[in-house]
Amino acid sequence: MLFIYCNKITNRVDYIFSLYFREILGLNIRLTDDSDEFKSYNGPKISYTSHPISNELFFLSKSLLFENDIKQMDINIFDWEGVKVFFPTNKNSSLPFDPFSAGFYLVSRYEEYLPHIEDKFDRFEAKESFAFQHDFIKKPMINLWAKCLKKILTDRFPDLSFPETKYQFISSLDIDNAFAYREKGFIRNLGAFSKSLIGFNFDDIKERSKVLLGLIPDPYDTYEYQLSLQKKYKFKSIYFFLLADYGLNDKNISVNNRKLHSLIKSISDYFEVGIHPGFGSNSSKNKLKIENRRLESILKREVTKSRQHFLKLSFPETYRNLIELDISDDYTMGYASSTGFRSSICTSFYFYDLDLELKTALKIHPFTAMEATLKDYMNLSPQEAINELKMLIDEVKNVDGTFISIWHNESLSDSKNWTGWRKVYEEMVKYALPND
């Protein structure tokens, strides 16, 4: 056990020490604000305060974890042994920075509670983030700092035992539009034919006609390929289905379509399935509730996993809505415009509500890369995308974290603007799989 002294144990203190030591490093810890008890303890111990208490490993504390407000801060960032750090300390501290305040600032998404510029979809943009502006968005900083803490503790307390941690890979797929042409109904197909005719897009007319006549498969029907790949490489995926009413940004087939229901049921026989709340659900708890109930009705069981459509995520409203719906696990944490680590971590963690100063039961599973980001935002070729993915996977493997990717059924069609991207997915899977 690691004994930790802090002159005041706030919710922020309890949260970040639990994240570093229990959740990332797997240690059993105990926090105390009793200095006499701390002094008399003879086992491994650290203090997080303004000055050392006894013969312990000392970390100088900054003020962030003892505050209960949210305010603009002037943060100075600097390099230490090749790693970006901030919240500087002094020579008496075991580290030249405060990893606990820095970690809390990043993982709580503190900056997203402050005034910021949003994109056209009302999302916090990657380029507005502290990590992007200081060029560490592609580094899981909290996991790297945890490695530093582990080394310091091991050097000081050789008998302190750390459990083995293992790198993991999770493939996830969003089903925004189950089929390109099939099951769209007469009116939608007629409108699509008219639009293609006006735009002289005869290739689309030809392909749509062949699909509807049953002469060729629907290009978005890549489910057999997905299943065959998962069997070949022995991995499983999590699927998120969009069940929103038809709208400008929600264009799946009818939520009442029998083929869609059959697809969801068949996939749920092999893999985990979660809800993909529609674009409008982010601002409407009622829509979120209706969509989740639709999926539960199809599956005949409770749904506990979620990822927001368009990765729409507003703090703290989005997560509060999910909690109210008894969602236990969310997979939205990441950016559409950049690969990397939005919360600077590649380990699952619990959402901390800064407004309420409360650790919640909602577990956040941050993803690292989405194929649309690579192609549409970063404008990478398939080979460049493979290189980018391998670099990110290496970063996650280096800290025994979890690499989570996002793909869509249409991007695996290997046709039109997605030609060549099926190879990217397979190369990513092969490289991302754990060695054991």
Image: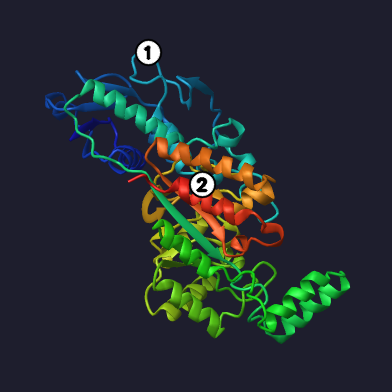
Q: Are marks 1 and 2 in contact (CB under 8 Å)?
A: no
Coloring scheme used = rainbow
Tag 1: Cα neighbours inside 10 Å, few (<14), some, or many (≥20)? few
259 versus 104 height, above or below: below
174 versus 144 height, above or below: below
**Label placed on residue 91:** 1
User: Is 257 left, or right, of 34 in this rendering?
Assistant: right
387 versus 279 height, above or below: above
Q: Secondary structure at mark 2?
A: loop
Q: Provide the residue designation for mark 2.
A: 368
Identity of the residue furthest to the top in this view:
91
Quadrant that contains the N terminus: top left
Q: Residue at x 56, y 79 (%)?
A: 255
Q: Residue at x 42, y 40 (%)?
A: 68
Residue 303 place in picture, x, y as percent: 41, 70
Q: Amino acid at mark 2?
A: Thr
Residue 425 place in picture, x, y as percent: 55, 53
338 versus 88 height, above or below: below
Which residue is more in the foreground, 244 or 314? Answer: 244
User: Can residue 241 be seen at all in this image of the molecule?
Assistant: no
User: Is 373 left, or right, of 203 in this rendering?
Assistant: left
Residue 51 place in picture, x, y as percent: 30, 19
Tag 2: Cα neighbours inside 10 Å, few (<14), some, or many (≥20)? many
User: Is 90 left, or right, of 132 in this rendering?
Assistant: left
Q: Amino acid at mark 1?
A: Lys
Q: Give whichever of discs 1 and 2 has the lower sequence position.
A: 1
Q: Nearer the viewer, mark 1 or mark 2?
A: 2
Residue 24 place in picture, x, y as percent: 33, 40
